[in-house]
Amino acid sequence: MPAPYAGGCQCGELRFNLTAEPLTAYRCHCSECRRHSGSAFGTSVIVPRRAFSLIQGRPRSWDRTADSGGVNESHFCANCGTRVYGERKNVEVDFVVLRHGSFDDPSSIKPIGDIWTKRALPWVVMDQDLIQIESQPTPTEMSAMVERFQAVSGTG
């Protein structure tokens, strides 16, 4: 499904639009992503900041230190608590990280890899055809993830 995309929180109070294709999508096995997803991993969709707009509601936010050491600002619905998106704090970046499950139809946004695999739970089965990165991706590794996503999704 090509852009635009829409999504929001579980109760519908927060809503967003995305007017461009995602840059990449991956599963993260770090302890924080496992904790906030309530699952074995979190699935993130990296999107261009200029294409993301919050169109309804006012999120609450909190800061957390990632396993990489960077500080992330997490935005969630004050009513239902659903975490919808996050962004790096005190760093100029041109992307926003959306939670995969916050899209109205996440089926067309297929993750192309796994990061922080050294922290994966021992029973998680990894698809060996996907990119596997042991910890925080380097800029070169992240570029490879963007290129692979664009090639697989036909958006590049």
Image (tube, rainbow, N blue to C red):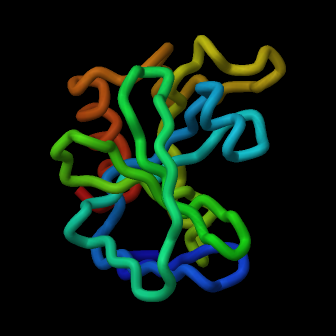
Above or below residue 33? Residue 73 is below
How far across and down, in percent of the image, does residue 49 sit? 25, 63
Residue 133 visible in image: yes
Residue 139 in the image: x percent, y percent?
A: 22, 26
Residue that extends furthest to the right in the rendered view of this protein: 123
23 with respect to 133 (left or right): left
Q: Which is nearer the eye, 144 or 115?
A: 115
Residue, x 50% and y 41% (percent of image)?
26
Please tell me whether residue 126 is drawn above or below residue 46 in the rendered image.
above
Image-based side of 37 in relation to 140, left or right? right
Image position of 145 (left or right of 34)? left
For the C terminus, the image quarter is: bottom left
Name the residue nearer the viewer: 1 or 12.
12
Does residue 152 show up?
no
Q: Is residue 49 above or below residue 16?
A: above
Q: Is residue 40 above or below residue 46?
A: above
Q: Camera-side residue: 146 or 121?
A: 121
x and y, in percent, of residue 114 in the image: 54, 30
Task: Report x, y in % for residue 132.
Answer: 50, 22
Tally the numbered discs. 0
Residue at 51% x, 50% y is 62
Residue located 56% across and 71% down the image: 103
- Asked where in the image residue 7 lies, by quadrant, the reply is bottom right
Q: Quadrant of residue 143?
A: top left
